[in-house]
Amino acid sequence: MAIHPKEQRLVLKYADEPGYTPHIDSYLEHGGYDMLKKAVTMEPQAIIDEVKASTLRGRGGAGFPCGLKWSFVDRKSGKPIYLICNCDESEPGTFKDRQIVHKDPHQLIEGMMISCFANNVAKAFIYIREEMPYGAKILDQAILEAKEKGFVGDNVCGSGYSCDIVVHRGAAAYICGEETGLIESLEGKRANPRIKPPYFPAVLGLYNCPTIVNNVETLCNAVHILDMGAEGFKKIGRPNNAGTRIWCVSGGVQRPGYYEVGEMTLGELVYDICGGPLPGRTIKAIIPGGSSMKILKNGERYKGKNPDGSEYDWGLEDIPLDYDGIAAAGSMSGSGGMMVLDDTVSIPAALANLMAFYSHESCGQCTPCREGSLWLKKITSRMVHGEARPEDVDLMLDVAGQIAGRTICAFGFAVAWPVQSYIAKFEDEFREYAAHLSDPKADRQAIKELACNG
Amino acid sequence: MDLKPETLAEIEAAIPKYPEAQSAVMPLLHAIQQDQGYISNEAAEWVAEKLGIAPINVLSVVTFYPFFRQHKIGKRHIRVCRTLSCAMAGGAKVCDKMLSEFEAELNQVSPDGEVTVEFAECLASCGSAPVMLVDEDLHENLTVEKAKEICDKIKAEAKA
Protein backbone atom coordinates (compact mmCIF):
# COMPACT_ATOMS: atom_id res chain seq x y z
CA MET A 1 0.00 0.00 0.00
CA ALA A 2 1.37 3.40 -0.98
CA ILE A 3 2.41 5.66 1.87
CA HIS A 4 0.39 8.90 1.95
CA PRO A 5 2.49 12.08 2.25
CA LYS A 6 0.58 13.15 5.38
CA GLU A 7 1.45 9.92 7.18
CA GLN A 8 4.17 9.81 9.80
CA ARG A 9 5.34 6.24 9.95
CA LEU A 10 7.33 4.61 12.70
CA VAL A 11 5.92 1.13 13.17
CA LEU A 12 5.01 0.70 9.52
CA LYS A 13 8.04 2.61 8.26
CA TYR A 14 9.45 -0.21 6.19
CA ALA A 15 6.41 -2.46 5.86
CA ASP A 16 5.39 -1.17 2.46
CA GLU A 17 8.82 -0.32 1.13
CA PRO A 18 9.36 -2.04 -2.23
CA GLY A 19 11.54 -5.11 -1.79
CA TYR A 20 11.11 -5.24 2.00
CA THR A 21 10.24 -8.76 3.12
CA PRO A 22 9.32 -10.41 6.45
CA HIS A 23 12.68 -12.19 6.47
CA ILE A 24 15.35 -11.26 8.96
CA ASP A 25 17.80 -10.08 6.31
CA SER A 26 15.49 -7.22 5.33
CA TYR A 27 15.08 -6.25 8.94
CA LEU A 28 18.80 -6.37 9.66
CA GLU A 29 19.56 -4.28 6.56
CA HIS A 30 17.32 -1.59 8.05
CA GLY A 31 19.03 -1.54 11.42
CA GLY A 32 16.89 -4.28 12.90
CA TYR A 33 17.76 -5.66 16.35
CA ASP A 34 20.13 -2.75 17.05
CA MET A 35 17.82 -1.60 19.83
CA LEU A 36 17.74 -5.08 21.37
CA LYS A 37 21.55 -5.08 21.33
CA LYS A 38 21.41 -1.71 23.09
CA ALA A 39 18.73 -2.86 25.54
CA VAL A 40 20.72 -5.80 26.87
CA THR A 41 23.54 -3.45 27.83
CA MET A 42 21.12 -1.30 29.88
CA GLU A 43 19.70 -1.74 33.34
CA PRO A 44 16.21 -3.25 32.95
CA GLN A 45 14.75 -0.56 35.20
CA ALA A 46 16.20 2.11 32.91
CA ILE A 47 14.20 0.68 30.02
CA ILE A 48 11.03 0.62 32.09
CA ASP A 49 11.70 4.21 33.12
CA GLU A 50 12.19 5.25 29.51
CA VAL A 51 8.93 3.61 28.43
CA LYS A 52 7.18 5.22 31.36
CA ALA A 53 8.64 8.62 30.50
CA SER A 54 7.54 8.24 26.89
CA THR A 55 3.90 8.16 28.09
CA LEU A 56 3.20 5.45 25.53
CA ARG A 57 -0.41 4.35 25.85
CA GLY A 58 -1.56 0.84 25.00
CA ARG A 59 -2.75 0.54 21.43
CA GLY A 60 -5.16 -2.31 22.05
CA GLY A 61 -8.23 -0.38 23.09
CA ALA A 62 -8.24 0.96 26.62
CA GLY A 63 -5.23 3.25 26.13
CA PHE A 64 -3.70 2.49 29.53
CA PRO A 65 -0.12 3.81 29.91
CA CYS A 66 2.26 0.98 29.04
CA GLY A 67 5.07 1.90 31.45
CA LEU A 68 2.63 2.18 34.31
CA LYS A 69 1.25 -1.27 33.48
CA TRP A 70 4.78 -2.65 33.59
CA SER A 71 5.41 -0.96 36.92
CA PHE A 72 2.51 -2.86 38.50
CA VAL A 73 4.20 -6.22 37.89
CA ASP A 74 4.81 -8.13 41.09
CA ARG A 75 8.59 -8.62 41.08
CA LYS A 76 8.87 -9.93 44.60
CA SER A 77 6.72 -13.05 44.39
CA GLY A 78 9.60 -15.23 43.20
CA LYS A 79 7.33 -16.62 40.48
CA PRO A 80 8.24 -16.40 36.80
CA ILE A 81 6.98 -13.30 35.01
CA TYR A 82 5.27 -13.85 31.66
CA LEU A 83 4.72 -11.51 28.76
CA ILE A 84 1.92 -12.10 26.29
CA CYS A 85 1.61 -10.28 23.01
CA ASN A 86 -2.08 -9.83 22.30
CA CYS A 87 -2.33 -10.45 18.57
CA ASP A 88 -6.00 -11.35 18.74
CA GLU A 89 -7.38 -8.10 17.39
CA SER A 90 -10.96 -9.09 16.69
CA GLU A 91 -12.74 -5.77 16.94
CA PRO A 92 -14.61 -5.24 13.68
CA GLY A 93 -12.96 -2.39 11.84
CA THR A 94 -9.43 -3.12 13.05
CA PHE A 95 -6.77 -4.80 10.95
CA LYS A 96 -3.44 -3.25 11.95
CA ASP A 97 -1.88 -6.36 13.52
CA ARG A 98 -2.19 -8.10 10.17
CA GLN A 99 0.05 -5.48 8.52
CA ILE A 100 2.75 -5.69 11.19
CA VAL A 101 2.78 -9.47 11.47
CA HIS A 102 2.67 -10.13 7.75
CA LYS A 103 5.09 -7.44 6.68
CA ASP A 104 7.48 -6.75 9.56
CA PRO A 105 7.32 -9.60 12.10
CA HIS A 106 10.85 -9.05 13.35
CA GLN A 107 9.97 -5.59 14.59
CA LEU A 108 7.38 -7.19 16.84
CA ILE A 109 9.87 -9.82 18.00
CA GLU A 110 12.47 -7.16 18.77
CA GLY A 111 9.89 -5.10 20.67
CA MET A 112 8.88 -8.18 22.64
CA MET A 113 12.46 -9.11 23.47
CA ILE A 114 13.23 -5.58 24.68
CA SER A 115 10.08 -5.67 26.82
CA CYS A 116 10.92 -9.15 28.10
CA PHE A 117 14.45 -8.11 29.06
CA ALA A 118 13.16 -5.00 30.81
CA ASN A 119 10.69 -7.07 32.83
CA ASN A 120 12.86 -10.13 33.50
CA VAL A 121 10.66 -12.43 31.43
CA ALA A 122 12.03 -15.81 30.39
CA LYS A 123 9.03 -17.02 28.42
CA ALA A 124 6.72 -14.98 26.23
CA PHE A 125 3.74 -15.88 24.10
CA ILE A 126 2.19 -14.41 21.00
CA TYR A 127 -1.52 -15.16 21.05
CA ILE A 128 -2.55 -14.84 17.41
CA ARG A 129 -6.07 -15.12 16.09
CA GLU A 130 -6.82 -18.06 13.85
CA GLU A 131 -8.33 -15.84 11.19
CA MET A 132 -4.73 -15.03 10.25
CA PRO A 133 -3.36 -18.52 9.57
CA TYR A 134 -0.40 -17.28 7.54
CA GLY A 135 0.44 -14.77 10.26
CA ALA A 136 1.15 -17.61 12.70
CA LYS A 137 3.41 -19.30 10.15
CA ILE A 138 5.27 -16.07 9.44
CA LEU A 139 5.85 -15.54 13.16
CA ASP A 140 7.04 -19.12 13.68
CA GLN A 141 9.51 -18.68 10.84
CA ALA A 142 10.65 -15.28 12.12
CA ILE A 143 11.29 -16.69 15.60
CA LEU A 144 13.36 -19.49 14.09
CA GLU A 145 15.42 -16.94 12.16
CA ALA A 146 15.84 -14.77 15.24
CA LYS A 147 16.97 -17.79 17.26
CA GLU A 148 19.58 -18.67 14.64
CA LYS A 149 20.99 -15.16 14.90
CA GLY A 150 20.96 -15.12 18.68
CA PHE A 151 18.18 -12.59 19.20
CA VAL A 152 15.74 -15.05 20.81
CA GLY A 153 16.45 -18.07 22.99
CA ASP A 154 19.57 -18.71 24.99
CA ASN A 155 22.13 -16.01 25.68
CA VAL A 156 20.44 -13.20 23.77
CA CYS A 157 23.06 -11.09 21.93
CA GLY A 158 25.73 -12.72 24.11
CA SER A 159 24.36 -11.01 27.21
CA GLY A 160 23.67 -14.12 29.26
CA TYR A 161 19.95 -13.31 29.19
CA SER A 162 17.66 -16.04 27.82
CA CYS A 163 14.06 -15.84 26.71
CA ASP A 164 11.88 -17.93 24.43
CA ILE A 165 8.80 -16.88 22.46
CA VAL A 166 5.96 -19.30 21.69
CA VAL A 167 3.32 -18.61 19.04
CA HIS A 168 -0.10 -19.74 20.23
CA ARG A 169 -3.00 -19.89 17.79
CA GLY A 170 -6.46 -18.95 18.96
CA ALA A 171 -9.63 -20.31 17.41
CA ALA A 172 -11.71 -17.28 16.44
CA ALA A 173 -13.23 -16.16 19.72
CA TYR A 174 -13.43 -12.36 20.05
CA ILE A 175 -13.28 -12.48 23.81
CA CYS A 176 -9.69 -13.74 23.65
CA GLY A 177 -8.75 -10.13 22.91
CA GLU A 178 -9.76 -9.29 26.47
CA GLU A 179 -6.59 -9.80 28.48
CA THR A 180 -7.93 -12.10 31.17
CA GLY A 181 -10.00 -14.07 28.64
CA LEU A 182 -6.80 -14.44 26.67
CA ILE A 183 -4.98 -15.75 29.73
CA GLU A 184 -7.70 -18.32 30.39
CA SER A 185 -7.51 -19.37 26.75
CA LEU A 186 -3.74 -19.72 26.91
CA GLU A 187 -4.18 -21.92 29.94
CA GLY A 188 -6.23 -24.25 27.73
CA LYS A 189 -9.70 -23.30 28.87
CA ARG A 190 -12.75 -21.43 27.64
CA ALA A 191 -11.89 -17.75 27.36
CA ASN A 192 -14.08 -16.62 30.23
CA PRO A 193 -12.68 -13.32 31.52
CA ARG A 194 -11.61 -13.09 35.14
CA ILE A 195 -13.08 -10.58 37.52
CA LYS A 196 -10.78 -7.69 38.44
CA PRO A 197 -10.18 -6.17 40.91
CA PRO A 198 -8.81 -7.53 43.14
CA TYR A 199 -6.44 -9.61 41.01
CA PHE A 200 -4.94 -8.00 37.94
CA PRO A 201 -2.71 -9.96 35.57
CA ALA A 202 0.33 -7.96 36.69
CA VAL A 203 0.01 -9.81 40.01
CA LEU A 204 -1.89 -13.00 39.20
CA GLY A 205 -2.02 -13.70 35.49
CA LEU A 206 -0.94 -16.70 33.46
CA TYR A 207 -0.64 -19.78 35.73
CA ASN A 208 -1.26 -17.36 38.60
CA CYS A 209 2.06 -15.69 37.90
CA PRO A 210 2.72 -11.99 37.24
CA THR A 211 1.86 -11.36 33.60
CA ILE A 212 2.08 -8.47 31.15
CA VAL A 213 -0.36 -8.40 28.25
CA ASN A 214 0.47 -5.87 25.55
CA ASN A 215 -0.88 -5.20 22.10
CA VAL A 216 1.24 -5.77 18.95
CA GLU A 217 1.54 -2.08 18.07
CA THR A 218 2.40 -1.20 21.68
CA LEU A 219 5.28 -3.67 21.78
CA CYS A 220 6.64 -2.45 18.44
CA ASN A 221 6.79 1.04 19.88
CA ALA A 222 9.27 -0.15 22.52
CA VAL A 223 11.85 -0.32 19.71
CA HIS A 224 11.21 3.27 18.70
CA ILE A 225 11.21 4.60 22.26
CA LEU A 226 14.69 3.17 22.78
CA ASP A 227 15.75 4.55 19.42
CA MET A 228 14.34 8.06 19.80
CA GLY A 229 14.41 8.34 23.57
CA ALA A 230 11.31 9.19 25.55
CA GLU A 231 11.63 12.90 24.78
CA GLY A 232 11.95 12.30 21.04
CA PHE A 233 8.95 9.98 21.11
CA LYS A 234 6.84 12.52 22.97
CA LYS A 235 7.46 15.12 20.28
CA ILE A 236 5.11 13.14 18.04
CA GLY A 237 1.42 13.65 18.78
CA ARG A 238 -0.17 15.79 21.47
CA PRO A 239 0.68 15.70 25.18
CA ASN A 240 -0.70 12.52 26.80
CA ASN A 241 -1.14 11.11 23.30
CA ALA A 242 2.48 10.52 22.40
CA GLY A 243 3.68 8.70 19.32
CA THR A 244 2.02 7.69 16.13
CA ARG A 245 -1.12 5.61 15.81
CA ILE A 246 -2.12 3.23 13.09
CA TRP A 247 -5.66 3.95 11.98
CA CYS A 248 -7.62 1.39 10.04
CA VAL A 249 -10.31 2.98 7.92
CA SER A 250 -13.08 1.01 6.26
CA GLY A 251 -16.55 1.59 4.89
CA GLY A 252 -17.69 4.50 2.77
CA VAL A 253 -14.48 6.29 1.82
CA GLN A 254 -12.60 6.38 -1.46
CA ARG A 255 -9.32 5.02 -0.10
CA PRO A 256 -9.93 2.63 2.79
CA GLY A 257 -6.84 1.14 4.36
CA TYR A 258 -4.37 1.54 7.22
CA TYR A 259 -2.55 4.78 7.88
CA GLU A 260 0.00 5.64 10.54
CA VAL A 261 -0.15 9.26 11.63
CA GLY A 262 1.04 11.65 14.30
CA GLU A 263 -0.98 14.67 15.35
CA MET A 264 -3.94 15.04 13.03
CA THR A 265 -7.67 15.71 12.96
CA LEU A 266 -10.32 13.18 12.11
CA GLY A 267 -11.23 15.27 9.06
CA GLU A 268 -7.69 15.19 7.70
CA LEU A 269 -7.66 11.41 7.92
CA VAL A 270 -11.09 10.84 6.42
CA TYR A 271 -11.12 13.57 3.78
CA ASP A 272 -7.49 14.27 2.89
CA ILE A 273 -5.93 10.85 3.29
CA CYS A 274 -8.90 8.60 2.61
CA GLY A 275 -10.39 10.85 -0.07
CA GLY A 276 -13.73 11.46 1.64
CA PRO A 277 -16.96 9.71 0.72
CA LEU A 278 -17.58 7.88 -2.52
CA PRO A 279 -18.77 10.07 -5.43
CA GLY A 280 -22.31 11.32 -4.95
CA ARG A 281 -22.48 10.28 -1.31
CA THR A 282 -22.11 12.06 1.99
CA ILE A 283 -20.81 10.87 5.33
CA LYS A 284 -23.62 10.09 7.73
CA ALA A 285 -21.67 8.93 10.76
CA ILE A 286 -18.34 7.58 11.90
CA ILE A 287 -17.55 4.82 14.36
CA PRO A 288 -14.17 6.10 15.49
CA GLY A 289 -12.29 3.24 17.08
CA GLY A 290 -13.76 -0.17 16.36
CA SER A 291 -17.35 -1.33 16.23
CA SER A 292 -18.00 -1.21 19.97
CA MET A 293 -17.28 2.50 20.20
CA LYS A 294 -20.01 5.11 20.39
CA ILE A 295 -20.97 6.51 17.03
CA LEU A 296 -20.29 10.11 16.00
CA LYS A 297 -22.90 11.79 13.81
CA ASN A 298 -21.91 14.10 10.99
CA GLY A 299 -23.21 17.62 11.57
CA GLU A 300 -23.06 17.44 15.35
CA ARG A 301 -21.07 19.99 17.33
CA TYR A 302 -18.83 18.86 20.15
CA LYS A 303 -18.30 21.51 22.80
CA GLY A 304 -16.22 21.58 25.96
CA LYS A 305 -13.24 22.98 27.78
CA ASN A 306 -9.60 22.26 27.08
CA PRO A 307 -7.26 21.50 30.00
CA ASP A 308 -5.99 25.11 29.81
CA GLY A 309 -9.52 26.44 30.29
CA SER A 310 -10.07 27.51 26.70
CA GLU A 311 -13.20 26.26 24.97
CA TYR A 312 -13.51 24.10 21.90
CA ASP A 313 -16.37 23.80 19.47
CA TRP A 314 -15.65 21.07 17.00
CA GLY A 315 -17.43 19.63 14.05
CA LEU A 316 -16.80 15.99 13.25
CA GLU A 317 -13.84 16.89 11.04
CA ASP A 318 -12.16 19.00 13.76
CA ILE A 319 -11.85 16.27 16.37
CA PRO A 320 -8.20 15.59 17.25
CA LEU A 321 -7.41 12.06 16.17
CA ASP A 322 -6.16 10.66 19.45
CA TYR A 323 -7.27 9.19 22.77
CA ASP A 324 -8.25 12.46 24.43
CA GLY A 325 -9.67 14.18 21.36
CA ILE A 326 -12.12 11.41 20.57
CA ALA A 327 -12.94 10.98 24.26
CA ALA A 328 -13.80 14.69 24.41
CA ALA A 329 -16.26 14.10 21.58
CA GLY A 330 -17.97 11.42 23.65
CA SER A 331 -16.47 8.25 22.21
CA MET A 332 -13.16 6.37 22.30
CA SER A 333 -10.33 5.77 19.87
CA GLY A 334 -10.32 2.12 20.94
CA SER A 335 -8.17 -0.07 18.75
CA GLY A 336 -8.00 2.48 15.93
CA GLY A 337 -10.57 0.82 13.69
CA MET A 338 -12.56 3.59 12.08
CA MET A 339 -15.70 2.71 10.18
CA VAL A 340 -17.29 5.32 7.95
CA LEU A 341 -21.02 5.07 7.31
CA ASP A 342 -22.31 7.03 4.33
CA ASP A 343 -25.84 8.18 3.58
CA THR A 344 -26.80 4.85 1.99
CA VAL A 345 -26.37 3.03 5.30
CA SER A 346 -29.43 2.20 7.38
CA ILE A 347 -28.41 2.73 11.00
CA PRO A 348 -30.83 0.11 12.41
CA ALA A 349 -29.49 -2.40 9.89
CA ALA A 350 -25.90 -1.55 10.80
CA LEU A 351 -26.80 -2.06 14.45
CA ALA A 352 -28.47 -5.37 13.63
CA ASN A 353 -25.25 -6.47 11.97
CA LEU A 354 -23.22 -5.61 15.06
CA MET A 355 -25.69 -7.19 17.46
CA ALA A 356 -25.41 -10.42 15.50
CA PHE A 357 -21.65 -10.15 15.99
CA TYR A 358 -21.74 -9.41 19.70
CA SER A 359 -24.37 -12.02 20.52
CA HIS A 360 -22.25 -14.58 18.67
CA GLU A 361 -19.11 -13.52 20.53
CA SER A 362 -20.44 -13.22 24.08
CA CYS A 363 -18.53 -15.79 26.12
CA GLY A 364 -21.75 -16.56 27.98
CA GLN A 365 -20.30 -16.27 31.44
CA CYS A 366 -22.45 -13.33 32.64
CA THR A 367 -26.19 -13.64 32.25
CA PRO A 368 -26.89 -9.98 31.36
CA CYS A 369 -24.45 -10.18 28.46
CA ARG A 370 -25.34 -13.68 27.27
CA GLU A 371 -29.09 -13.15 27.36
CA GLY A 372 -29.09 -9.43 26.64
CA SER A 373 -26.93 -9.57 23.54
CA LEU A 374 -29.10 -12.30 22.04
CA TRP A 375 -32.22 -10.34 22.93
CA LEU A 376 -30.81 -7.26 21.20
CA LYS A 377 -29.94 -9.34 18.18
CA LYS A 378 -33.52 -10.59 18.00
CA ILE A 379 -35.02 -7.11 18.34
CA THR A 380 -32.75 -5.53 15.73
CA SER A 381 -33.29 -8.50 13.45
CA ARG A 382 -37.05 -8.21 13.51
CA MET A 383 -36.64 -4.47 12.98
CA VAL A 384 -34.83 -4.95 9.68
CA HIS A 385 -37.28 -7.65 8.63
CA GLY A 386 -40.18 -5.23 9.01
CA GLU A 387 -41.58 -6.94 12.10
CA ALA A 388 -40.67 -4.42 14.79
CA ARG A 389 -43.05 -3.44 17.56
CA PRO A 390 -43.67 0.17 18.65
CA GLU A 391 -42.12 -0.46 22.07
CA ASP A 392 -38.93 -1.95 20.64
CA VAL A 393 -36.78 1.18 20.75
CA ASP A 394 -37.41 1.70 24.45
CA LEU A 395 -36.98 -2.01 25.06
CA MET A 396 -33.56 -1.92 23.40
CA LEU A 397 -32.45 0.93 25.63
CA ASP A 398 -33.72 -0.92 28.65
CA VAL A 399 -31.90 -4.13 27.74
CA ALA A 400 -28.67 -2.28 26.89
CA GLY A 401 -28.87 -0.46 30.22
CA GLN A 402 -29.19 -3.80 32.00
CA ILE A 403 -25.96 -5.05 30.38
CA ALA A 404 -23.63 -2.04 30.63
CA GLY A 405 -21.53 -2.20 33.77
CA ARG A 406 -23.13 -5.41 35.00
CA THR A 407 -20.66 -7.89 33.58
CA ILE A 408 -17.26 -9.20 34.58
CA CYS A 409 -15.47 -7.65 31.60
CA ALA A 410 -15.97 -4.65 29.33
CA PHE A 411 -17.75 -6.74 26.71
CA GLY A 412 -21.00 -5.61 28.30
CA PHE A 413 -20.17 -2.04 27.33
CA ALA A 414 -19.20 -3.20 23.85
CA VAL A 415 -22.73 -4.54 23.42
CA ALA A 416 -24.50 -1.61 25.04
CA TRP A 417 -22.62 1.39 23.68
CA PRO A 418 -23.61 0.91 20.03
CA VAL A 419 -27.27 0.46 21.01
CA GLN A 420 -27.33 3.47 23.30
CA SER A 421 -25.37 5.80 21.02
CA TYR A 422 -27.07 4.81 17.75
CA ILE A 423 -30.49 5.38 19.26
CA ALA A 424 -29.36 8.65 20.88
CA LYS A 425 -28.05 9.98 17.57
CA PHE A 426 -30.52 8.41 15.13
CA GLU A 427 -33.67 7.94 17.18
CA ASP A 428 -35.96 8.99 14.33
CA GLU A 429 -34.69 6.19 12.14
CA PHE A 430 -35.33 3.61 14.85
CA ARG A 431 -38.78 5.04 15.64
CA GLU A 432 -39.68 4.87 11.94
CA TYR A 433 -38.72 1.23 11.79
CA ALA A 434 -40.49 0.44 15.05
CA ALA A 435 -43.70 2.20 14.14
CA HIS A 436 -43.65 1.27 10.46
CA LEU A 437 -44.21 4.96 9.78
CA SER A 438 -42.61 4.70 6.40
CA ASP A 439 -41.06 2.05 4.32
CA PRO A 440 -37.34 2.72 4.81
CA LYS A 441 -35.81 4.67 1.97
CA ALA A 442 -33.38 1.96 0.96
CA ASP A 443 -34.99 -1.18 -0.39
CA ARG A 444 -35.71 -4.00 2.04
CA GLN A 445 -33.30 -6.41 0.35
CA ALA A 446 -30.37 -3.99 0.80
CA ILE A 447 -31.28 -3.56 4.45
CA LYS A 448 -31.34 -7.31 5.03
CA GLU A 449 -28.00 -7.68 3.26
CA LEU A 450 -26.42 -5.01 5.45
CA ALA A 451 -27.81 -6.56 8.61
CA CYS A 452 -26.58 -9.92 7.32
CA ASN A 453 -27.83 -11.58 10.47
CA GLY A 454 -29.98 -14.38 9.15
CA MET B 1 -6.49 -42.60 17.06
CA ASP B 2 -5.11 -42.96 13.59
CA LEU B 3 -3.08 -39.82 13.13
CA LYS B 4 -0.48 -39.11 10.48
CA PRO B 5 3.14 -39.33 11.65
CA GLU B 6 3.65 -35.60 11.04
CA THR B 7 0.61 -34.80 13.19
CA LEU B 8 1.96 -36.93 16.00
CA ALA B 9 5.33 -35.22 15.68
CA GLU B 10 3.63 -31.81 15.81
CA ILE B 11 1.75 -32.86 18.94
CA GLU B 12 4.87 -34.13 20.67
CA ALA B 13 6.67 -30.89 19.85
CA ALA B 14 3.81 -28.68 21.07
CA ILE B 15 3.38 -30.05 24.59
CA PRO B 16 6.80 -29.13 26.06
CA LYS B 17 6.45 -25.53 24.84
CA TYR B 18 4.09 -24.84 27.72
CA PRO B 19 4.81 -24.76 31.44
CA GLU B 20 1.51 -26.55 32.08
CA ALA B 21 0.22 -29.34 29.85
CA GLN B 22 -3.37 -28.10 29.63
CA SER B 23 -2.15 -25.08 27.67
CA ALA B 24 -1.42 -27.43 24.80
CA VAL B 25 -5.12 -28.26 24.33
CA MET B 26 -5.63 -25.78 21.50
CA PRO B 27 -2.43 -26.62 19.58
CA LEU B 28 -3.34 -30.31 19.80
CA LEU B 29 -6.89 -29.68 18.63
CA HIS B 30 -5.60 -27.59 15.72
CA ALA B 31 -3.27 -30.40 14.73
CA ILE B 32 -5.99 -33.04 14.92
CA GLN B 33 -8.52 -30.90 13.05
CA GLN B 34 -5.95 -30.34 10.31
CA ASP B 35 -5.35 -34.08 10.18
CA GLN B 36 -8.91 -35.38 10.39
CA GLY B 37 -11.04 -32.44 9.32
CA TYR B 38 -12.90 -32.20 12.61
CA ILE B 39 -12.69 -33.10 16.31
CA SER B 40 -14.49 -36.33 17.11
CA ASN B 41 -15.40 -37.38 20.64
CA GLU B 42 -12.72 -40.02 20.34
CA ALA B 43 -10.18 -37.31 19.47
CA ALA B 44 -11.22 -35.19 22.43
CA GLU B 45 -10.78 -38.16 24.75
CA TRP B 46 -7.41 -38.93 23.20
CA VAL B 47 -6.25 -35.34 23.79
CA ALA B 48 -7.49 -35.49 27.39
CA GLU B 49 -5.52 -38.64 28.06
CA LYS B 50 -2.44 -37.25 26.34
CA LEU B 51 -2.49 -34.15 28.54
CA GLY B 52 -3.67 -35.83 31.72
CA ILE B 53 -6.87 -33.80 32.00
CA ALA B 54 -10.55 -34.71 32.04
CA PRO B 55 -12.32 -35.16 28.68
CA ILE B 56 -14.87 -32.51 29.65
CA ASN B 57 -12.05 -29.97 29.82
CA VAL B 58 -11.22 -30.70 26.20
CA LEU B 59 -14.83 -30.77 25.06
CA SER B 60 -15.51 -27.45 26.74
CA VAL B 61 -12.74 -25.94 24.61
CA VAL B 62 -13.95 -27.60 21.41
CA THR B 63 -17.47 -26.28 21.88
CA PHE B 64 -16.41 -22.76 22.87
CA TYR B 65 -14.22 -21.74 19.95
CA PRO B 66 -15.92 -21.15 16.59
CA PHE B 67 -13.06 -22.50 14.48
CA PHE B 68 -13.14 -25.92 16.15
CA ARG B 69 -15.83 -28.19 14.74
CA GLN B 70 -17.32 -31.52 15.70
CA HIS B 71 -18.57 -32.51 12.27
CA LYS B 72 -17.12 -33.10 8.84
CA ILE B 73 -17.19 -30.35 6.27
CA GLY B 74 -16.69 -30.20 2.50
CA LYS B 75 -13.29 -30.64 0.93
CA ARG B 76 -12.89 -26.87 0.75
CA HIS B 77 -13.89 -24.55 3.56
CA ILE B 78 -15.26 -21.18 2.49
CA ARG B 79 -15.79 -18.54 5.16
CA VAL B 80 -17.28 -15.24 4.02
CA CYS B 81 -16.96 -12.34 6.44
CA ARG B 82 -20.36 -10.99 7.40
CA THR B 83 -19.39 -8.23 9.80
CA LEU B 84 -20.16 -4.55 9.20
CA SER B 85 -17.38 -3.35 6.89
CA CYS B 86 -17.73 -6.40 4.69
CA ALA B 87 -21.53 -6.18 4.80
CA MET B 88 -21.39 -2.53 3.70
CA ALA B 89 -19.19 -3.59 0.79
CA GLY B 90 -21.48 -6.39 -0.42
CA GLY B 91 -20.40 -9.46 1.55
CA ALA B 92 -23.90 -10.94 1.54
CA LYS B 93 -24.04 -10.95 -2.27
CA VAL B 94 -20.64 -12.66 -2.40
CA CYS B 95 -21.87 -15.33 -0.01
CA ASP B 96 -25.05 -15.85 -2.04
CA LYS B 97 -22.94 -16.31 -5.15
CA MET B 98 -20.76 -18.93 -3.49
CA LEU B 99 -23.86 -20.79 -2.31
CA SER B 100 -25.63 -20.69 -5.65
CA GLU B 101 -22.57 -21.77 -7.61
CA PHE B 102 -22.25 -24.90 -5.48
CA GLU B 103 -26.02 -25.31 -4.99
CA ALA B 104 -25.20 -25.36 -1.29
CA GLU B 105 -27.05 -24.33 1.84
CA LEU B 106 -25.30 -22.07 4.34
CA ASN B 107 -23.31 -24.08 6.91
CA GLN B 108 -23.98 -27.35 5.05
CA VAL B 109 -21.74 -29.52 2.91
CA SER B 110 -22.59 -28.93 -0.75
CA PRO B 111 -24.38 -31.85 -2.51
CA ASP B 112 -21.18 -32.75 -4.40
CA GLY B 113 -19.21 -32.75 -1.14
CA GLU B 114 -16.78 -30.17 -2.45
CA VAL B 115 -17.41 -27.18 -0.20
CA THR B 116 -18.92 -25.90 2.99
CA VAL B 117 -19.84 -22.23 2.87
CA GLU B 118 -20.21 -20.36 6.14
CA PHE B 119 -20.35 -16.81 7.35
CA ALA B 120 -17.44 -15.79 9.58
CA GLU B 121 -17.24 -13.00 12.11
CA CYS B 122 -14.72 -10.26 11.30
CA LEU B 123 -11.70 -11.64 9.42
CA ALA B 124 -9.62 -8.53 10.25
CA SER B 125 -9.23 -7.22 6.74
CA CYS B 126 -11.93 -4.53 6.78
CA GLY B 127 -9.96 -2.15 4.57
CA SER B 128 -10.14 -4.57 1.67
CA ALA B 129 -13.75 -5.60 2.24
CA PRO B 130 -15.51 -7.76 1.39
CA VAL B 131 -13.22 -10.67 2.13
CA MET B 132 -13.40 -14.42 2.57
CA LEU B 133 -11.15 -17.28 3.52
CA VAL B 134 -10.96 -20.29 1.23
CA ASP B 135 -9.24 -22.78 3.49
CA GLU B 136 -6.29 -20.63 4.62
CA ASP B 137 -6.21 -18.22 1.66
CA LEU B 138 -7.64 -14.75 2.13
CA HIS B 139 -9.45 -13.26 -0.87
CA GLU B 140 -9.97 -9.50 -0.73
CA ASN B 141 -11.93 -6.74 -2.46
CA LEU B 142 -14.44 -9.30 -3.67
CA THR B 143 -17.22 -8.74 -6.13
CA VAL B 144 -19.82 -11.19 -7.39
CA GLU B 145 -17.72 -11.57 -10.53
CA LYS B 146 -14.56 -12.33 -8.55
CA ALA B 147 -16.53 -14.79 -6.42
CA LYS B 148 -17.59 -16.60 -9.59
CA GLU B 149 -13.95 -16.83 -10.72
CA ILE B 150 -12.97 -18.35 -7.37
CA CYS B 151 -15.81 -20.87 -7.65
CA ASP B 152 -14.69 -21.83 -11.16
CA LYS B 153 -11.16 -22.35 -9.86
CA ILE B 154 -12.35 -24.53 -6.99
CA LYS B 155 -14.44 -26.60 -9.40
CA ALA B 156 -11.53 -26.97 -11.81
CA GLU B 157 -9.22 -28.08 -8.99
CA ALA B 158 -11.83 -30.60 -7.85
CA LYS B 159 -11.87 -32.18 -11.31
CA ALA B 160 -8.07 -32.21 -11.65
Image (spheres, coloured by chain):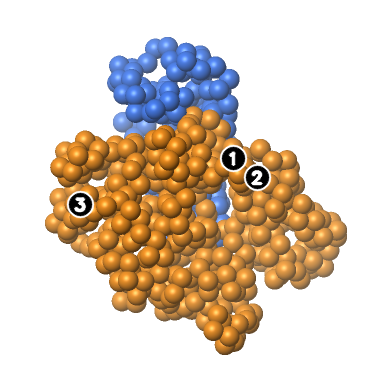
Chain colours: A orange, B blue
In the image, B85: left or right of A248?
Answer: right
Q: Position of residue A346 (x, y in %)?
A: 65, 65
Q: Which residue is mark 1?
A: A194
Q: Position of residue A174 (x, y in %)?
A: 54, 45
- Look at 29% across and 37% down and name the residue there: A164
Chain at tag 1: A
On screen, residue A429 above or below B4: below
**Nearer to us in this view, A260 or A46:** A46
Chain at tag 2: A
Q: Residues within 10 Å of mark 2 (few under 14, many from 20)?
A: some
Q: Position of residue A183 (x, y in %)?
A: 49, 38
| Tag 2: amino acid | Ile
| Tag 1: amino acid | Arg
| Tag 3: amino acid | Thr
**Nearer to us in this view, B37 or A43:** A43
Q: What separation in Å lies between label 2 and label 3 (alpha carbons)?
A: 42 Å
- Look at 43% across and 15% down and name the residue there: B50
